[in-house]
Amino acid sequence: MRARLLTLRELIFEVAAETQGVGALEEVLKWGEPAYLTSETKSGSTLRIAWKKSQPDRYSMFFICTTNLIETFRSLFPHDFEYEGNRAIHFKTDAALPEDSIRFCIAAALTYRLPAAKSKHPHRAASEA
């Protein structure tokens, strides 16, 4: 499981470095879990990754539930992830990580507060009105 979570961590840092406007990430613990913040630019929404003993066959990426990110991901990638409400996407431990889809999700979260992101994610403007 450690290797899977480290893979997600590596993807988060790679996507941040490749995505204009994100800047350096701050890695912190929130609720005892690794979390990634765009503290330098304030461009995005916090991402968190975790594995729970109560669900040993999956690991997860969590998003701030007051965003429309999960709604957007669900509409774009209905079969790539298992979703939990408006807060998480789950990955099965025995399945390959859908890397292209997860890269999109990470970039969307890390740029959520940028003006250009509003036009890329039309559901966001409607949910904030």
Image (cartoon, rainbow, N blue to C red):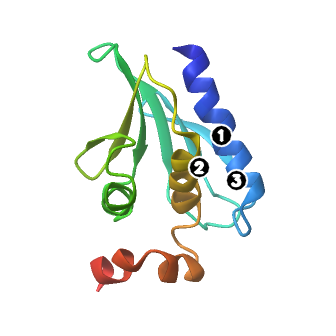
Q: Which mark is on residue 118?
A: none
The quarter of the displayed image where residue 2 is located: top right
* Neighbours of disc 3 within 10 Å: few (<14), some (14-19), many (20+): many
Rounded to the nearest whole Å, what is the CA distance between mark 2 and mark 3?
10 Å
User: On the picture, is 24 further left or further right than 117?
Assistant: right
Relative image position of residue 45 (x, y in whole percent): 50, 59
- Let me know if residue 43 appears in the view: yes
Q: Amino acid at mark 2?
A: Arg
Rounded to the nearest whole Å, what is the CA distance between mark 1 and mark 3?
8 Å
Q: Earlier in the sequence, mark 1 or mark 3?
A: 1
Label 3: which residue?
16
Along the line of sight, the residue nearer the viewer: 122 or 33: 122
Rounded to the nearest whole Å, what is the CA distance between mark 1 and mark 2?
7 Å
Q: Amino acid at mark 1?
A: Leu
Along the line of sight, the residue nearer the viewer: 76 or 110: 76
User: On the picture, is 123 further left or further right than 19?
Assistant: left
Relative image position of residue 44 (x, y in whole percent): 55, 63
Label 2: which residue?
103
Relative image position of residue 26 (x, y in whole percent): 67, 47
SS at badge 2: helix
For the residues bearing labels 1 and 2, Cβ distance under 8 angstroms = yes
User: On the picture, is 96 further left or further right than 89?
Assistant: right
Q: Judge whether 120 appears above or below 94 on screen.
A: below
Q: Quadrant of the C terminus?
A: bottom left
Q: Judge whether 61 appears above or below 86 on screen.
A: above
